Amino acid sequence: MRVHVVSDVHGAVEALAGAGEGADALVLLGDLILFLDYADHTRGIFPDLFGVEAADRIVELRTARRFEEARAFGRSLWEGVDRDSAMDAAVRKQYAEMFAVLPTPTYATYGNVDVPSLWPEYAGDGTTVLDGTTVELGGLVFGFVGGGLRTPMRTPYEIDDEAYAAKIAALGEVDVLCSHIPPAVPELCYDTVARRFERGSQALLDAIHAVRPRYSFFGHVHQPLTQRMRIGATECVNVGHFNATRVPYVLEW
């Protein structure tokens, strides 16, 4: 059995179209939408709407953790613009392109920048969306938990710690624990380029200790200090910033 695992696609449609080649299944751990590319400020919904100079400025403010200033700057840009309509159209366009190229079968969960309410409109028959549920592949039980935890960034799909932990608890015993965000281990949560800790989940870490899955797969941290580590019996792997690497993680058994 061969499964390819990707996360943080962020608009890389052409690469996503080939991500499942040679695999029995594709596992997708969220963040399909590209709102703003921190490495290339010309890409994404934000510069399309407001230009590259505005993108430069908001990246500068966010990187400096000046979140209130960043939000104020963002509000000033949206004045006179129908935000809901503009965002809905832009997100729908990206989802239409990306879901159309997903192979059959694909097993997917949400990232923190995704909009779960729109997924049923675009996920075809070959794509199974899972969040707080499991699926058996080749004799292994894969458990999926989507979204992120609350942060000052206020991305679209952030939830309370308690709700996130409840989804993990609902999985029960799994062989492969699939999430968008990492367990709360500093080395797995620190982004060396953004120079900040992203939020990891203590509930995920607790589940790794209690359930002892073979693997814990995740993304979210684009340039992690540590890409993989073993916690007890579990191999924890950041499957990569697919938008940058264009290469899926390969799991064979």
Image (spheres, rainbow, N blue to C red):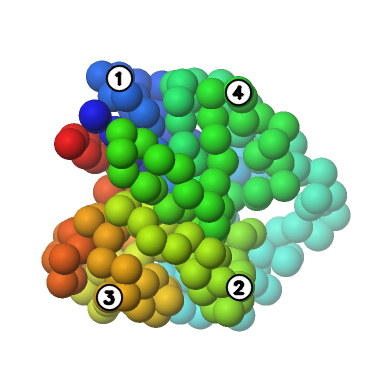
In terms of sequence position, does the residue under pointer 3 or pointer 1 come before the other? 1
- Give the class, few, some or many, for how many residues have Cα within 10 Å of label 3's Cα (few <14, many ≥20): some
Quadrant where the C terminus is found in the figure: top left
**At x 44% / y 63%, what residue is drawn?**
172
What kind of residue is marked 1? Glu
Residue wearing tag 2? 163
Residue wearing tag 3? 209
| Helix, strand or loop for disc 2 | helix
In three-dimensional space, the C-alpha distance between marks 3 and 4, rounded to whole angstroms, equals 35 Å
Which circle marks residue 21 in the picture? 1
Q: Residue 149, position in %: x, y?
A: 53, 71
In the figure, residue 25 lies in which quadrant?
top left
In terms of sequence position, does the residue under pointer 4 or pointer 2 come before the other? 4
In three-dimensional space, the C-alpha distance between marks 2 and 1, rounded to whole angstroms, equals 35 Å
What kind of residue is marked 2? Ala
The residue lying toward the viewer, choosing from 82 and 100, is 100
**At x 36% / y 72%, what residue is drawn?**
207
Q: Are marks 2 and 3 in contact (CB under 8 Å)?
A: no
- In-image side of 144 versus 86 (left or right): left
What kind of residue is marked 4? Asp
In terms of sequence position, does the residue under pointer 1 or pointer 4 come before the other? 1
Which one is closest to the eye, mark 2 or mark 1?
2
Which one is closest to the eye, mark 2 or mark 3?
3
The residue lying toward the viewer, choosing from 105 and 150, is 105
In three-dimensional space, the C-alpha distance between marks 1 and 4, rounded to whole angstroms, equals 18 Å
Residue wearing tag 4? 125
Q: Are marks 3 and 1 in contact (CB under 8 Å)?
A: no
In three-dimensional space, the C-alpha distance between marks 2 and 3, rounded to whole angstroms, equals 20 Å
- Give the class, few, some or many, for how many residues have Cα within 10 Å of label 2's Cα (few <14, many ≥20): few
- Give the class, few, some or many, for how many residues have Cα within 10 Å of label 4's Cα (few <14, many ≥20): few
In the figure, residue 245 lies in which quadrant?
top left
The residue lying toward the viewer, choosing from 169 and 110, is 169
